Amino acid sequence: MGRHLDMMAGGGAQRRMFISNLNEQEAILVGRYENPYDPADYAAYLAAFARVVAAARTERRSVVLIIDIQDGYPSPNALQRKNIGEAWANATDVTGVIAIISGSVFIRGIITAIEWFLKNSPTRRETRAYARASDAVLWLADQSGVTTSELHAAIEAVRTRRRAQHATST
């Protein structure tokens, strides 16, 4: 099994809004966001992203990125979108597949529309939006070659940590 690193934004007794799990051997990054928003979330995401890109280069694999967004989580502002775009732009040698899990039909529609516009971009990473993690896992396994059990385990690790954190903060 690969080396797994867990990262959270925030500190102390604060609730964490971004929780992630990184499997370096498989170059899988699962990030989970939820309200309320904290700017540290995007800094934590960028740090985790840099690590998964480094792992993908080391292991000569594609990045598998899973973003689990709670409904109501605010979209990134202009600077954050720029930083995320630049992070991908600086990783032109790394391929990847991205699944965004959201219960929001609106967010899934936006992701689909963006994909239509970027369809012919030479640096595009295949991105899909799903309402259910199980559907995202099937697509990611097909696209990446990572087993469905490994993908389910990566998602569940983040969700389990979130449940444990919620139980201790109430």
Image (cartoon, rainbow, N blue to C red):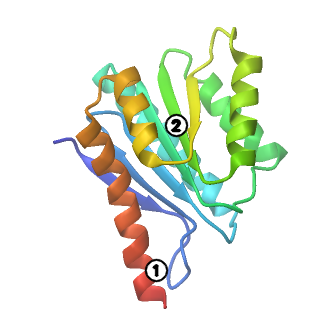
Residue 10: where, in percent of width, then height? 56, 71
- Looking at numbered disc 1 in the image, what kind of residue is underneath it? His
Query: Which residue is rendered at x = 32% and y = 19% of the image?
Result: 60
Residue under label 2: 99
Q: Indicate the secondary structure of the residue bearing disc 1.
A: helix
Depth order, front residue of 39/67: 67
The quadrant in which the N terminus is found is top left
Depth order, front residue of 116/81: 116
* Outermost residue, bottom side: 170
Question: Residue 166, which numbered label?
Answer: 1
Density class for disc 2 (Cα within 10 Å; few <14, some 14-19, many ≥20) is many
Taking the image as shown, residue 59 lies to the left or right of residue 28, namely left
* Outermost residue, left side: 1
Q: Is residue 163 above or below residue 81?
A: below
Residue 29: where, in percent of width, then height? 42, 43
- State the CA–CA distance, disc 2 to disc 1: 24 Å
Q: Indicate the secondary structure of the residue bearing disc 2.
A: strand
